[in-house]
Image (cartoon, rainbow, N blue to C red):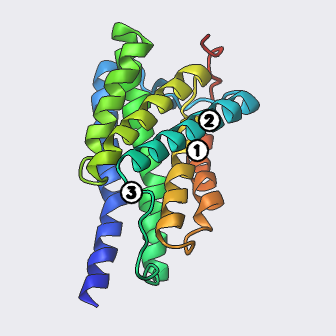
């Protein structure tokens, strides 16, 4: 019972920590912007099908890179002795909200909408993407095995490119949420498979009402 309570507390702490981080980012951004609005942080509408194409390319590339890392680390052939424990409804909901909804929204606003955008204005998109990706990887040092930190950085680099080519944070949030939801579904032996369609939809529904401006023409 105590272990379950600890898991619930940890899952509940994730969205709370994300909200604190988001508040800090917005406060810092407000000090450096004459007029801070959702569009300032990349929350803008964009063309649907190009966003789907770029998002799919980034996600497939990230998975392929993670697969390569797993093979190089010799982790591809592990066999578990038993399946994952049954996840309670409360813990499942909190985990999905914290990991597959809140975290993608907050991390994309923080790393792509604010940090990458600022670095791009300073030194251009490629250096901005590299620096942002490295910091994104470092931010996951306590959440991922060391071998997959490089994969997190590569994913962060892909998210920067997705933001750059679409001009909008919405595709980044959707792809990030989808990725995290798939990870949760796999980690729980399919118990949280419902999060795969639900989490990206919930993430986008949180931001779509704020996306009143259209993204500038996609970068080439």
Quadrant in which the C terminus appears: top right
Mark 1 surroundings: few (<14), some (14-19) or many (≥20) residues within 10 A: many
Q: Residue furthest bottom?
A: 1
- Residue designated by label 1: 174
Kindly check if marks 3 and 1 are in contact, taking CB atoms under 8 A apart as contact: no
**Residue 71's spot in the image, x, y percent?**
43, 48
Mark 2 surroundings: few (<14), some (14-19) or many (≥20) residues within 10 A: many
Give the CA distance from mark 2 to mark 3: 27 Å
Give the CA distance from mark 3 to mark 1: 28 Å
Circle 3 SS class:
loop
Left or right of 128? Residue 88 is: right
Left or right of 152? Residue 172 is: right
Q: How many labels, in total?
A: 3
Kindly check if marks 2 and 3 are in contact, taking CB atoms under 8 A apart as contact: no
Residue 194, above or below 126? below
Eye-nearest disc, 2 or 3: 3
**Residue 30's spot in the image, x, y percent?**
33, 27
Mark 3 surroundings: few (<14), some (14-19) or many (≥20) residues within 10 A: few
Label located before the other in sequence (1 or 2): 2
**Residue 100's spot in the image, x, y percent?**
49, 56
Eye-nearest disc, 3 or 1: 3
Specify the quadrant of the image occupied by residue 193: bottom right
Label located before the other in sequence (3 or 1): 3
**Residue 25's spot in the image, x, y percent?**
31, 35
Q: Nearer the viewer, residue 149 or 21?
A: 149
Q: Nearer the viewer, residue 109 or 85?
A: 85
- Residue designated by label 2: 55
Circle 2 SS class:
helix
Quadrant in which the N terminus appears: bottom left
Kindly check if marks 1 and 2 are in contact, taking CB atoms under 8 A apart as contact: yes
Q: Which mark is residue 75?
A: 3
Observer able to see residue 210: no
């Amino acid at each position: 019972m105590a272990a379950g309570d600890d898991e619930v507390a940890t899952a509940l702490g994730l969205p709370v920590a994300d909200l604190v981080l988001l508040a800090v980012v917005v406060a810092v951004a407000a000090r450096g912007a004459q007029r801070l609005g959702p569009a300032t942080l990349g929350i803008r509408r964009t063309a649907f099908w190009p966003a789907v194409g770029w998002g799919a390319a980034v996600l497939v590339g990230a998975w392929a890179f993670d697969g390569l890392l797993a093979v190089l680390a010799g982790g591809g052939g592990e066999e578990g002795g038993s399946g994952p424990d049954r996840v309670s409804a409360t813990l499942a909901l909190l985990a999905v909200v914290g990991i597959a909804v809140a975290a993608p929204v907050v991390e994309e606003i923080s790393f792509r909408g604010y940090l990458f955008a600022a670095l791009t204005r300073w030194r251009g998109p490629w250096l901005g993407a590299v620096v942002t990706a490295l910091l994104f990887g470092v931010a996951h040092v306590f959440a991922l095995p060391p071998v997959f930190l490089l994969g997190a950085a590569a994913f962060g680099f892909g998210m920067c490119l997705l933001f750059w080519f679409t001009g909008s944070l919405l595709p980044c949030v959707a792809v990030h949420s989808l990725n995290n939801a798939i990870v949760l579904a796999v980690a729980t032996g399919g118990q949280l498979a419902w999060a795969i369609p639900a989490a990206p939809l919930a993430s986008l529904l949180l931001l779509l009402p704020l996306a009143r401006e259209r993204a500038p023409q996609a970068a080439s």
